[in-house]
């Protein structure tokens, strides 16, 4: 009888120890499951918001215009079942598969960004929106003008007659101002295709605000590389712009022409760009971000009287936080 009771006591002790060992394992498994569910819910959330603070700049192709500083870059996106907002693009999703998606979208035309609008070091949605040193309804052609034009310019602006032609040209160039151009709203189709070899994005956009009454075709190819916490995203692409679009922003109208600023009719043209974006994740929220981009301007833009650069360079490095 004593032996039976001893075995019973031993059984209860072993059972109790087993419970003590199993409970922490179950609790740990539940905690890990909750963590995985939280991560999945975070990744599948319908909204995304991030802010990057640092320093960068974007060269301004307009004559006598300072480079555009970059201090803050915001990243804001919201994705519903059909409607989405992605860093300035408002769209309607018609089809989304494993690799292919088709959208109708609209946004503000980025060509306006090189003209004076918000002359601050803050960039909303990562789109530079600052511009020139001057703000005027008319502009003067960059470069040397003819002697007759110099004489007329001297008389209008009271320049001393004894100035040499070179000195008058310098004075003329300093007085170059940028014509006023207004923002346009573009809309059209967007196609995305994602595969193991990268992502292709195409946009076919037209002016729905009847500002420039033109259209453009935008395309890019991106291949992301993941190395531990480091994500590299090299991209190449092009932007073809119609003559109506480029002539509105870079042409010189008859009522804008004056000594030193000839009438200019812009034709269609294609810009090409290459970009490298990098993000190093320090934690789930914090990271280091960097962007470098080079965009070559079409001949139609380069030949504009108030453009004095052949390309636009952009760079930014800073600390980012994803909410």
Image (cartoon, rainbow, N blue to C red):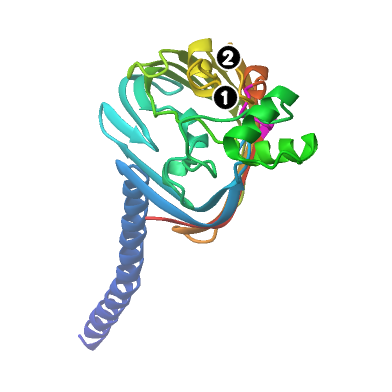
Q: Residue 291: x and y, percent?
A: 60, 45
- How many numbered discs sit on the rendered protein? 2
Above or below residue 37? Residue 282 is below
Q: Which residue is mark 1?
A: 220
Q: Residue 312: x and y, percent?
A: 64, 35
Determine the residue positioned at 47% across, 18% down. Answer: 255
> Residue lying furthest bottom in this view?
2
Q: Which residues are magenta?
A: 304-311
Viewer-closest of 240 and 163 = 163
Viewer can see residue 135 = yes
State how far apart marks 2 and 1 are (Cα).
25 Å
Q: Which residue is mark 2?
A: 266
Neighbour tally class for label 2: few under 14, some 14-19, many 20 plus, Cα within 10 Å = many
Q: Name the image quarter holding residue 44.
A: top left
Viewer-closest of 43 and 36 = 43
Disc nearest the viewer among 2 and 1: 2
- Residue 177 relative to residue 94: left or right: right
Asked if residue 191 is among those painted magenta in the image, a careful observer would answer: no
Above or below residue 180? Residue 242 is above
- Residue 307 relative to residue 247: left or right: right
- Residue 60 relative to residue 14: left or right: right
Determine the residue positioned at 66% across, 41% down. Answer: 159
Viewer-closest of 226 and 205 = 205
């Amino acid at each position: 009888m004593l032996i039976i009771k001893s075995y019973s006591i031993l059984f209860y002790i072993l059972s109790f120890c087993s419970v003590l060992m199993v409970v922490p394992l179950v609790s740990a498994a539940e905690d890990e499951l909750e963590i995985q569910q939280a991560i999945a819910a975070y990744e599948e959330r319908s909204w995304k918001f991030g802010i990057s603070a640092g320093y960068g700049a974007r060269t301004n192709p307009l004559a006598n215009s300072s480079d555009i500083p970059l201090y803050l870059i915001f990243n804001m996106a919201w994705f519903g079942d059909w409607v989405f907002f992605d860093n300035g693009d408002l769209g309607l999703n018609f089809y989304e598969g494993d690799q292919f998606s088709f959208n109708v979208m609209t946004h503000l035309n980025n060509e306006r960004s090189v003209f004076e609008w918000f002359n601050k070091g803050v960039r909303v949605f990562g789109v530079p929106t600052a511009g020139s040193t001057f703000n005027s309804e008319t502009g003067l052609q960059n470069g040397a003008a003819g002697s007759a034009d110099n004489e007329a310019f001297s008389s209008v602006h009271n320049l001393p007659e004894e100035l040499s032609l070179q000195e008058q040209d310098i004075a003329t160039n300093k007085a170059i101002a940028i014509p006023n151009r207004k923002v346009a709203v573009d809309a059209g189709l967007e196609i995305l295709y994602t595969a193991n070899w990268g992502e292709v994005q195409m946009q076919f956009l037209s002016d729905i605000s009847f500002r420039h009454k033109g259209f453009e075709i935008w395309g890019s190819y991106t291949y992301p590389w993941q190395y531990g916490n480091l994500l590299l995203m090299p991209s190449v692409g092009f932007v073809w712009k119609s003559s109506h679009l480029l002539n509105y922003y870079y042409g010189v109208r008859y009522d804008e022409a004056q000594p030193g600023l000839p009438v200019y009719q812009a034709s269609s043209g294609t810009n090409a760009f290459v970009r490298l974006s990098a993000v190093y994740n320090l934690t789930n929220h914090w990271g280091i971000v960097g962007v470098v981009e080079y965009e070559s301007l079409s001949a139609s833009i380069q030949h504009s009287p108030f453009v004095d650069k052949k390309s636009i360079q952009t760079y930014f490095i800073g600390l980012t936080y994803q909410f």
